[in-house]
Image (cartoon, helix red, strand yellow):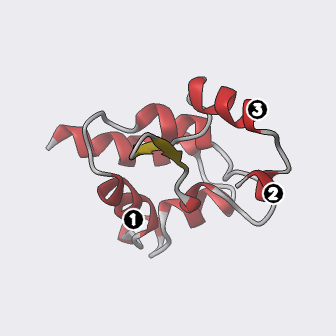
Amino acid sequence: MQRLLLLDRSTISRRIGRRRLWAIDLGGQKRIPTWQFTEHDTIPGLDRIVAAIPPGYAPQTIAARLTTPREELDNRTIVEYLVDGGDPTLAAEAVEALGQW
């Protein structure tokens, strides 16, 4: 991940701490899901998405919400929608909806 973002570990740790990057703890090590990245950066609006992730959900559930095509987004995923310039607020609402079930 460091190579992808061209950032040092401390910068990545700060982004995680400031909720500008989402990481999960796996066996005492931080893992950063790849759906958060474009070829050279993070997806637009990622900070809004990270803030909207409800606590307690499995990483697979979060990944599925963000990477499964959605009818209301013209069969694009939330990630594709954001990369295409979509509204981060609308995308964050779709993520927050997980916590409303």
Expressed as whole percent of the image width and height from the top left, the position of residue 36 reads: 59, 54
Q: With 75 as the anchor, is 86 left or right in this view?
A: right
Q: Which residue is mark 2?
A: 3
- Helix, strand or loop status at disc 3: helix
Q: With 42 as the anchor, is 79 left or right in this view?
A: left
Disc with the residue nearer the chain's start (2 vs 1): 2
Distance from label 3 to label 1 (Cα)?
35 Å
* Residue ranking furthest to the right: 6
Expressed as whole percent of the image width and height from the top left, the position of residue 39 reads: 77, 66
Quadrant of the rendered structure where residue 93 is? Answer: top left
Query: Which quadrant would the C terminus be assigned to in this image?
Result: top left
Q: Amino acid at mark 3?
A: Thr
Q: Are marks 3 and 1 in contact (CB under 8 Å)?
A: no
* Residue ranking furthest to the left: 101
Q: Which residue is mark 1?
A: 72
Q: Which residue is mark 3?
A: 11
Q: Is residue 86 above or below residue 8?
A: below
Distance from label 2 to label 3 (Cα)?
13 Å
Q: Amino acid at mark 2?
A: Arg
